[in-house]
Amino acid sequence: MSVPLHTPGRTAKANPSDVRRNNRALIFSLLFPSSQLSRAELGRRTGLSRVAVSDVVNDMLDEGLIRENGYETNATGKGKRGTLLSVDTTRLRIITVDLSQEQLVQGAVADLLGLPQDRMEIALGPDAHVDIDAIVQLVDQLREGLDTNRILGIGVSAPGVIQDGVIRESTFLGWHDVDIKGILQRRFGLPVTIGNDVTNSMLTERFFGEAGSNLLFVKNDRGIGAATLIDDVPVTGEGHAGGEIGHISIDPVDGPLCPCGKRGCMEMLISAHAIRERLAGADRGESPEIIRAAGARFAAALAVPIGLLDIADVCVYGPPDVINTTFLDAAQRQLDRLTTSKFHARTTIRRCQCGADITLRGGAIAVIRDHLDLG
């Protein structure tokens, strides 16, 4: 099923200097990720003239973004069958890097659907420090053997607050005002997109998972981060810190002290890492109740943004030993108690099924969105 990759509000009727770019975005969005449409059908769906569609399609064919893929089925048997177009996964490549893992840095060469075609990783030392020179070396190794003209860009997914390619603050990485985009662009001369790891993971769930155009996506592992999609637009916030919920205090008086300086932050109390630590010191019979209590607390923390934004879909990504049925059932019961009403449809909390490459794929999608200026 095809879902819109473009930012709502863009149309083919734009300022003259933007027409070509907007038309490219419209057409690619209709094909991404898996639709096959003829030029005539693209014209009908976009409202563009036959000449305009042909012009843009030919340009995208030459670039390697799309390809011709057989002929449409004509039930009547009358007239010339149209040539079907689809996203080309054979020519262009994207280098994508995931900095969100606790013990390693993952990298891959991906196609235009974000699927890794080649991959490498760097094991981190005992202090789990991520060295920028090691990232440069990883990208350099992934680039070997590739035609530079066929590399669409480099995508990096990192935890923390990111603005214009600069990692302003990442507690996880221990970075402050690191211009990773500038470093990589100067070294490789390629377009670079730096995105928040949770936001990029949400893009994978949107296009290859079960999400619709409105979604609250939560990653719960060593820390807790969230990303919000409203009418297919990721909401990053005025200070580019939208979704940084891990350091919101839910027990400021009696909660444990957090490295951020506050007490009772979500990460300290209900992250998968914190739950595991609690389980390690408990009897086996106490384990289900510990997980249920964490799930209920998790839902209570999300109830306000869910009610504020009227979101019906909450997708949670995390390790299955902790973010399991017990956790999700307890969260659902608590959320029902706190949010269900006659004017608010029931919000469903579900587990993400996209798999371990979710962040790598999202980094590749972010590069495509940047290349087509999709916002």
Image (cartoon, helix red, strand yellow):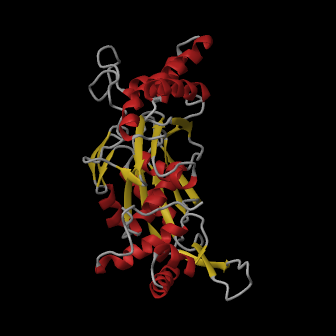
Residue name at image x 41 percent, y 31 percent: 302
Nearer to us in this view, 3 or 343: 343
Residue name at image x 36 percent, y 63 percent: 9
Which quarter of the figure is the N terminus placed in? Answer: bottom right
Which of the 4 image quarters holds residue 127?
Answer: top left
Q: Position of residue 201 (x, y in %)?
A: 48, 48
Above or below, 255 against 204 in this view is above
Q: Position of residue 346 (x, y in %)?
A: 50, 34
Above or below, 161 against 55 in this view is above
Residue name at image x 53 percent, y 81 percent: 61
Q: Residue furthest front?
A: 342
Which of the 4 image quarters holds residue 6?
Answer: bottom left
Nearer to us in this view, 24 or 362: 24
Which quarter of the figure is the C terminus placed in? Answer: bottom left
Report how many numbered discs are placed on residues in the image.
0
Nearer to us in this view, 295 or 16: 16
Above or below, 349 against 367 in this view is above
User: Left or right: where does residue 262 sit relative to residue 95?
Assistant: left
Can residue 271 be seen in this snapshot?
A: yes
Residue name at image x 39 percent, y 24 percent: 268
Q: Position of residue 254 (x, y in %)?
A: 33, 13
Q: Position of residue 313 (x, y in %)?
A: 50, 41
Can residue 64 be seen in this snapshot?
A: no
